[in-house]
Amino acid sequence: MYDYRLYLVTDEHQDIELLERVIREAIAGGVTMVQLREKHGDIRAFIQRAEAIKPMLQAAGIPLIINDRVDVALAVDADGVHLGQSDMPADVARRLIGEGKILGLSVENEQQLEAAQSLPLDYLGLSAIFPTPTKTDTVYAWGLEGLAKASAFSQLPLVAIGGINESNIRAVVEAGADGIALVSAICHADSPKDASQQLLTLIGGN
């Protein structure tokens, strides 16, 4: 139902002007979904950033997903929320955001993957595929073999994240990922548009 193929996760360290440029270019390059991440707890800044990029995404028909914060998603009428394991329970979040919104959950091990199958979710974020400097608290890396097993097991679409770049993205797709979530490979590229186009070509699909 949703196109998770090239799933951009924003860099919360970039200021709002740079964020807007990255999003504008990434849209032109073909990203299919965008998750706005803001880990510093400043809810006003989070809402401001969401409101800055939402019109661009809306015009392009690309869903805006809010990381962690159901209240922010409701405040800006985002297209969905992505939860972590320590965030609001998925069933509660679903009740608040309604059936028409996208709800994702990060799973970091096999037990969480199994438990998530019975939750009211649209997709799972499989974290981390490879160790990555943007996520310093990773305790487990799935690797390609773990991803392939998870893909065979899961009834929900899997979006792979963590240490994915041009050199390994095709292998991740071939291991069964329905989507690829990227931060640095797009946000830190000289041309986010060119990077997005190249990554989408490597991912393949419709």
Image (cartoon, rainbow, N blue to C red):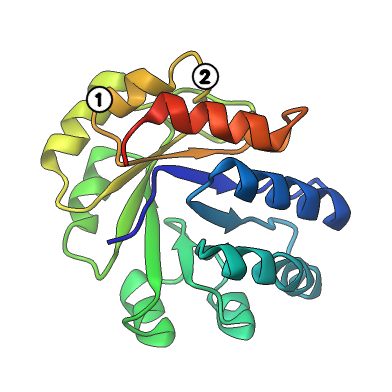
Residue 51 sits above or below residue 136 on the image: below
For this rendering, which residue is in front, 167 or 68? 167
Q: Secondary structure at mark 2?
A: loop
Q: Residue at x 51, y 61 (%)?
A: 62
Q: Is residue 63 visible?
A: yes
Q: Which mark is residue 175?
A: 1
- Where 25 sits versus 134, above or below? below
**Residue 46 spot, x, y in % from top left:** 73, 68
Q: Please state which of residues 103 and 17 is positioned toward the viewer in this rendering.
A: 17
Q: Position of residue 39 (x, y in %)?
A: 69, 56
Mark 2 and mark 1: Cα distance apart in space: 15 Å
Q: Is residue 84 left or right of residue 22?
A: left
Q: In this figure, which residue is indicated by the disc labeled 2?
A: 166
The numbered mark, 2 or 1, whose residue comes first in the sequence reads 2
Is the residue 43 above or below the residue 195 in the image?
below
Q: Locate residue 137, reporting x and y percent.
A: 56, 36
Tell me the residue at 39%/49% (across/down).
4
Identity, as a three-letter code, of the amino acid under mark 2: Glu
Lateral position of residue 121 relative to residue 43, left or right: left
Q: Is residue 162 left or right of residue 148?
A: right
Q: Which mark is residue 77?
A: none
Front residue of 156 and 185? 185
